[in-house]
Image: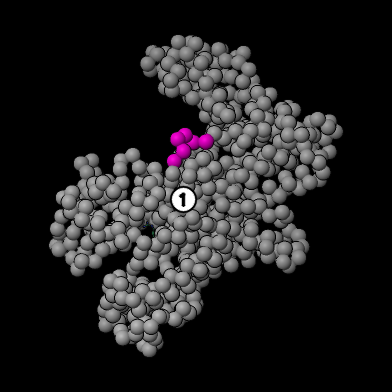
Amino acid sequence: MEKYLDIISAQLKEAFESKGYDGTRVAASVSNRPDLCEFQCNSAMALAKSAGKAPIMIAEEVAGQLKENPWFSEVSAVKPGFINLKVSGTQLAGYVDGMNHADKFGLENASPAKKIIIDYGGANVAKPLHIGHLRSAIIGESLKRICRYLGHEAIGDVHLGDWGLQMGQIIAELQERQPDLPYFDQAFDGSYPEEPPFTISELEEIYPCASGKCKTDPAFAQKAHEATHRLQNGDPGYRAIWNHILNVSIADLKKNYDALDVHFELWKKESDAQPYIPAMLEDMKGRGILKESEGALVVEIGQEDDKKELPPCIVVKSDGATLYSTTDLATLVERMQLFGPDKVIYVVDKRQELHFIQVFRTSRKAGIVPDQVELEFLGFGTMNGKDGQPYKTRSGGVMRLETLIGEINDAVLERMKENREFDQAEAQKTARIIGLAALKYADLSNQATKDYIFDLSRFTSFEGNTGPYILYTIVRIRSILNRYGKQPSGHIRFTGNEPEKQILIELSRFSDVIGSACKELAPHKICSYLYDLANAFNVFYHEVRILTEEDEEKKDSYLSLLDLTARILEQCISLLGFAAPERM
Ligand code: ARG
């Protein structure tokens, strides 16, 4: 369906043109003064200069032209040159009724549909998931769902970090603790045990211990370095340990991502890109873009319009080792070969921005990614505590995701108990659903690039701009529909009251909001839409008699409207990555 705003804008355009003005850039927008009007048009101001007229004169001419237009119920010109609009409730309800009967509420698929890889895991093997990875999981999952809803083919890749120094550190530590394991025996030629020599909790203890030791014990650090090198060069015993680490760790990561309702199509790892490196470097050499700089091989990435000088992208270190950038470049080679995407989106901490500028520019220079394939970096800000520092545990340690989820669920349980009694099992289950909504909504309602302060008590509140408030609204509507006891006809019309019209206006914005959330990679737009729609419903709920309405036709239209509202709210939260409980 054509977007409602586009329909309104087209009416305005026509009116401007019929009065002899250039209509190309004429558009309406939702009013930012809802007390005065529902929609507004500021185009008279923009046209005043070229027309050589006062904007108010243009606005008055156009307003006069629109007086009889069936889409509007009130049109007025206001100084200095605004056109304030109220729309016809009947026409509006007709539009929303059309949405109610259309597939995806009338949302049109993006054209052309694209194949999009979204890189939004980035968890590091053997290190527990911490809240640094939380934002990429939450934002990326939502973007993936939004892209798909618009008809794109979106593929999520977890892109695990399994190639760094942490692997050598763990191996070195394991060798100190259990030197007799066959993996360390150069003469061993049997097959290595299938059982891993550690559990996930042991692994999680080994890693911080080893990494701490590296900082204080240079001899150990050297060992870890050598172990990393040997692993990367294919030592069979080390490879076998590494496989154990991967298996144990991936099983645990899957559990954690599942708990977040975050799912990846691809469980690729940094190591998967390594085989692509030699040929890639050869090719770069052939193109003459590799330069030697203090023994390292680098690619210059500066461009004329750069405001400041950007450091080159290092692809091989002076000791011959490759790095994070090399891996990301090779991953692009791999992705182009295996999937041929139209676009790759990276959802990563914004502190990695320079790294991605280097990788993107190098990949263009090296012909790895052709110009028509888009590379996009969505850098997100930090989730901070009230002290403005990255959110920590009470004792000041790195906050683990599981701990955080536990804290949220406890806080939600408290709130639930204030409202009514629950049986134990239902309470636990419901608290998890609400907790996830609290967490994801809190994160997504901020513009991704901004830092935000994690405020447990605010985020879990059932009132205000929170996930639980949105869920509460859905549950409330569902309960009204249940009490009605039958399926409303689905026919929505305007019965003449103001709160009803506000819901209609919000509903009519659906396609516009989803489209721009996708185009701008901005799930926060869906959050603020949800909040507006939920508020419009709650005003209606408090001011209008619904189930006690005596006019059956009117009542049926109200319930059809509520049913659509609930379905749109539900669709939106599913695009954000959470769902509503049955009761709360
Ligand atoms: N593992 C990395 C980290 O923890 C994030 C990886 C992000 N994705 C990428 N393609 N570099 O910092």
**Residue for point 68% across, 55% down:** 581
Residue 360: x %, y % from top left: 30, 49
Taking 5 as reference, is 161 left or right? left
Residue 8 is situated, as x and y percent measured from the top left of the image, at: 56, 23
- The structure residue drawn at horizontal position 52% and vertical position 29%, both measured from the top left corner, is 29
In the picture, which quadrant includes the C terminus? bottom right
Instruction: Using the rendered view, name the quadrant where residue 227 is placed.
Output: bottom left
Sort mark 1 into few (<14), some (14-19) or many (20+) by Cα contacts within 10 Å. Answer: many
Q: Is residue 110 magenta?
A: yes
Residue on which the image places disc 1: 155
Query: Residue at coordinates 64% horizontally, 20% vertically from top-left?
Result: 73
The residue nearer to you, when weighing 331 against 581, is 331
Name the residue at the bottom extreme: 180
Report the front residue among 169 and 183: 183
Q: Is residue 62 left or right of residue 333?
A: right
Mark 1 belongs to which amino acid?
A: Ile
Looking at the rendered structure, the secondary structure element under dot 1 is: strand
Query: Where is residue 61 drawn, in percent x and y?
Result: 51, 12
Image quadrant of residue 408? Answer: bottom right
Task: Give the residues drawn in magenta, as a range.
Answer: 109-114
According to the image, what is the colour scheme of the structure? one colour
Main structural element of the magenta stretch: helix, strand or loop? loop
Quarter, ligand 1: bottom left
Which residue sits furthest right? 550
Q: Nearer the viewer, residue 148 or 512?
A: 148
**Which residue occupies the extreme front position in the image?**
190
